[in-house]
Image (cartoon, rainbow, N blue to C red):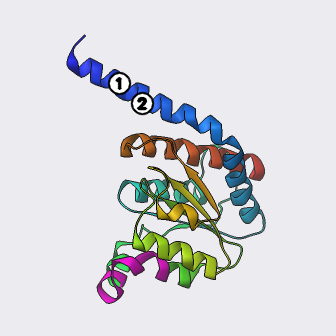
Amino acid sequence: MSSRTELLNASIQRSAAAITSLADQVATLDTLCDTVVGALSRGNKLLTLGHGGSAADALHMSEELVGRFDADRRPLPAVCLAADPTLMTCILNDYGFAEIFPRQIDALGQAGDVLVIFSTSGNGDGLERAARMASQKKMASIGLLGKGGGSVASMVDHALVVDSAETARIQEVHTLILHLILEAVDRQFV
């Protein structure tokens, strides 16, 4: 076996282990599904966010709700706070990086809405401020995290921390988690 083949097999095994470890958090995952489905059923919305690759996960979740995931159902209200580069650079220029998400939550968030934070580390001043703003707005907050959960884990209402220290493996599991939540949403709204 070539060294590349060995590396590929090792990565596949680490990914499988991270996914399998999710079975230990099914109760938490069920709570996340209830939180999202409940808010959408009451007419509230989701706000999603993340940095870098986690921003892509946040965008993925929001677009599947407004568009569709698997089932043909009505569009559901969701906004990715990392999707508008002109707004983000405006806030960055006038208020600084750490205010990009909190300022949007202050403008768009309402009591009963849900904030979903994607972060492989769970750390970052802007993420912490976003969680605090969601709490001030009486929003539920979910952290899809990794690497032990970081500081955000204790600041959100519901944290699901992927059991991995590798960014790529954490993001792979985050994709699975958001798909499982979307499946629960589809079952509710079809």
Residue 178: percent from left, percent from top: 57, 49
Residue 72 appearing in the image: no
Residue 65: percent from left, percent from top: 60, 57
Q: Is residue 142 above or below residue 90?
A: above
Residue closer to the observer: 74 or 181: 181
- Asked if the stretch drawn in magenta spans residue 107, the answer is no
The span picked out in magenta is 91-103
Determine which quarter of the picture holds residue 99. Answer: bottom left
Q: Residue drawn at (40%, 44%), measured in percent from left and top?
A: 165
Mostly what secondary structure, the magenta segment?
helix
Q: Is residue 178 above or below residue 40?
A: above
Circle on res. 51: none
The outermost residue toward the top is 1
The outermost residue toward the bottom is 94
Report the amino acid beneath label 2: Arg
Q: What residue is disc 2 on?
A: 14
Q: What residue is disc 1 on?
A: 10
Determine which quarter of the picture holds residue 8. Answer: top left
